Image (cartoon, rainbow, N blue to C red):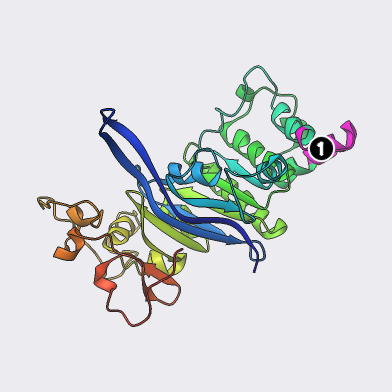
């Protein structure tokens, strides 16, 4: 099976202070692994609260920043060792949709500019007429009317329209992977379903893999097949989205799931697996220990010493928690 985009034990550290001889560092992402195969397009959610490392991961996967250790490859080539042709292919086949749909637009240009520029840069249209036809077709595929969209300035279209224009832009480049970083967090609730439906339709109709980065477990559950839960830069649980959301195993995942509001306050997503964090817990956490130890009601001595690996808690699900180290089965492979 051909590998498309692979993160292999990728770690990213940032210098936060200190002196020339001794620098203080923050680990934003630790030993993250992910593999997207070319032959099996998939929809994967990367979920976690603010500060969990989601944006750092997105920048690593797009080649914007370089990992401190580990590597990220596309079709077997390290993102930071590619030649010009390999870089061009990567830039075309891996597209990004960002959180704020307004920041990507130049207010002095009409919205047409973000659609015509990539077609010209990658030589995907043989004439102006063909380019216009491709643009109109892409807009229709994301639920926009070309006659009501083209010719306008960014401030003359709504936030939902701006975001769908960016989805149309990504589609124009015939990508293999779309990385969507919080694509609906700044859009009205009434438009979120429409945008997510557009992304899912691209996956289904054009065999495009989606990486959906979000803090919203509800939309992740609706859209994705698999989910990876991040906490302070480390993977704490991953697996099929139905299994992870409905039967969370890691104490942090349980807290996240139990925080989802439901119409009936007597109902909970996670059944009986509920966790109440210890508000007054005081843990002298050592470097390398479990990042969730200070908030975990099940904390043990081993949690303070070594970061837990991913254990196979169930078929198709891995959990980074020592509570599951004695579960029958081998230690889980990376995500």
Q: Which of the pair 316/260 is nearer the observer?
A: 316
Residue drawn where x is 74% and y is 29% of the image: 150
**How many callouts does the rendering have?**
1
Identify the image quadrant of the N terminus.
Answer: bottom right
Write down the quadrant of residue 55 in the picture.
top left
Q: Which residue is mark 1?
A: 123
**In this picture, residue 301 sits left or right of residue 88:** left
Residue 161 x, y percent position in the rendering: 62, 35
Relative to 214, does residue 150 appear above or below in the rendering?
above
Write down the quadrant of residue 63 in the picture.
top right
Residue drawn where x is 42% and y is 52% of the image: 47
Relative to 56, does residue 41 appear above or below in the rendering?
below
Query: Which residue occupies the extreme front position in the image?
Result: 21
| Neighbours of disc 1 within 10 Å: few (<14), some (14-19), many (20+) | few
Residue 85 x, y percent position in the rendering: 73, 42
Residue 246 x, y percent position in the rendering: 38, 67
Q: Which of the pair 108/148 is nearer the observer?
A: 108
Q: Which of the pair 21/60 is nearer the observer?
A: 21
- Magenta stretch, main secondary structure, is helix
Residue 185 x, y percent position in the rendering: 47, 40
**In this picture, residue 265 sits left or right of residue 135:** left
Q: Which residues are magenta?
A: 121-136
Judge whether residue 96 is colored magenta.
no
Q: Which of the pair 269/325 is nearer the observer?
A: 325
Q: Look at the numbered disc 1 and give the secondary structure of its residue.
A: loop
Relative to 59, does residue 35 appear above or below in the rendering?
below
Write down the quadrant of residue 6 in the picture.
bottom right
Query: Which residue occupies the extreme top position in the image?
Result: 108
Residue drawn where x is 65% and y is 65% of the image: 2
């Amino acid at each position: 099976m051909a590998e498309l985009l692979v993160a292999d034990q990728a770690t990213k550290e940032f210098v936060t202070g200190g002196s020339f001889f001794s620098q203080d560092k923050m680990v934003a992402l630790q030993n993250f692994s992910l593999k997207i195969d070319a032959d099996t397009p998939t929809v994967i959610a990367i979920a976690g609260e603010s500060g969990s490392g989601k944006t750092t991961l997105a920048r690593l996967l797009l080649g914007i920043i370089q990992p401190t250790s580990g590597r990220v490859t596309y079709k077997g080539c390290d993102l930071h060792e590619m030649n010009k042709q390999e870089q061009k292919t990567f830039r075309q086949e891996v597209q990004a949709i960002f959180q704020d749909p307004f920041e990507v637009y130049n207010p002095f240009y009409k919205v047409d500019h973000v659609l015509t520029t990539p077609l010209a840069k990658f030589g995907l249209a043989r004439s102006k007429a063909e380019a216009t036809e491709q643009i109109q077709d892409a807009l229709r595929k994301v639920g926009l009317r070309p006659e009501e969209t083209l010719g306008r300035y960014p401030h003359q279209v709504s936030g939902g329209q701006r975001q769908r224009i960016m989805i149309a832009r990504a589609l124009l480049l015939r990508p293999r992977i779309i990385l969507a970083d919080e694509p609906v967090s700044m859009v009205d609730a009434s438009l979120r379903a429409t945008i997510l439906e557009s992304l899912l339709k691209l996956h289904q109709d054009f065999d495009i893999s989606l990486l959906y980065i979000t803090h919203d477990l509800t939309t992740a559950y609706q859209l994705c097949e698999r989910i990876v839960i991040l906490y302070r830069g480390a993977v704490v649980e991953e697996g099929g989205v139905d299994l992870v959301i409905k039967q969370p195993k890691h104490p942090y995942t349980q807290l996240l799931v139990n925080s989802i509001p439901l119409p009936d306050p007597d109902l909970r997503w996670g059944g009986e697996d509920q966790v109440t964090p210890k508000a007054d817990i005081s843990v002298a956490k050592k470097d390398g220990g479990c990042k969730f130890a200070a908030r975990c009601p099940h904390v043990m001595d081993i949690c303070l010493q070594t970061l837990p690996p991913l254990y196979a808690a169930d078929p198709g699900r891995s959990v980074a928690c020592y509570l599951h180290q004695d579960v029958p089965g081998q230690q889980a492979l990376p995500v």
